[in-house]
């Protein structure tokens, strides 16, 4: 399933790289990535995506199925 994730707190390319790495560890395929807004293909729970992002110190504002 595809999820669009909106966050706050991502302020630079380093932040993007950290989130991309966390998604890779979840085996979620990043389809697009911008500051505070990204889309992933992931067969797991949206809560797993939320947890991975929040463990990095970012706030998840919303996760929507696409």
Image (cartoon, rainbow, N blue to C red):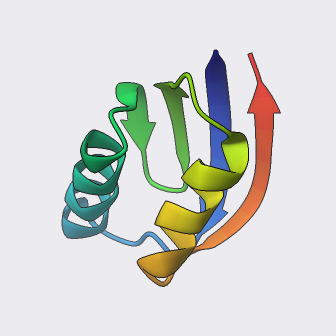
Q: Residue furthest front?
A: 44
Q: Quadrant of the N terminus?
A: top right
In terms of depth relative to the viewer, which is nearer, 65 or 10? 65
- Identity of the residue drawn at 52% across and 25% down: 42
Q: Position of residue 49 (x, y in %)?
A: 57, 50
In terms of depth relative to the viewer, which is nearer, 29 or 11? 29
User: For this view, does 63 lie left or right of residue 57?
Assistant: right
Q: Quadrant of the C terminus?
A: top right
- Identity of the residue drawn at 48% across and 78% down: 55
Q: Residue furthest bottom?
A: 57
> Which image quadrant is residue 30 in?
top left
- Identity of the residue drawn at 42% across and 43% down: 34
Question: Does residue 20 lie above or below 14 as drawn?
Answer: above
> Which image quadrant is residue 22 in?
bottom left
User: For this view, does 16 lie left or right of residue 44?
Assistant: left
Question: Does residue 9 lie above or below 39 as drawn?
Answer: below
Q: Position of residue 29 (x, y in %)?
A: 35, 24
Total marks placed: 0
> Which image quadrant is residue 60 in?
bottom right
- Identity of the residue drawn at 51% across and 38% down: 38
Q: Position of residue 6 (x, y in %)?
A: 67, 50
Question: Does residue 50 lie above or below 9 as drawn?
Answer: above
Q: Position of residue 57 (x, y in %)?
A: 48, 84
Question: Does residue 62 lie above or below 2 as drawn?
Answer: below
User: For this view, does 5 lie left or right of residue 33?
Assistant: right
């Amino acid at each position: 399933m595809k999820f669009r994730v909106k966050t706050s707190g991502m302020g630079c390319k380093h932040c993007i790289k950290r989130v991309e790495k966390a998604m890779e560890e979840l085996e979620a395929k990043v389809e697009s990535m911008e500051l505070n807004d990204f889309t992933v293909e992931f067969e797991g729970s949206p809560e797993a995506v939320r947890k991975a992002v929040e463990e990095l110190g970012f706030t998840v504002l919303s996760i929507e199925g696409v």
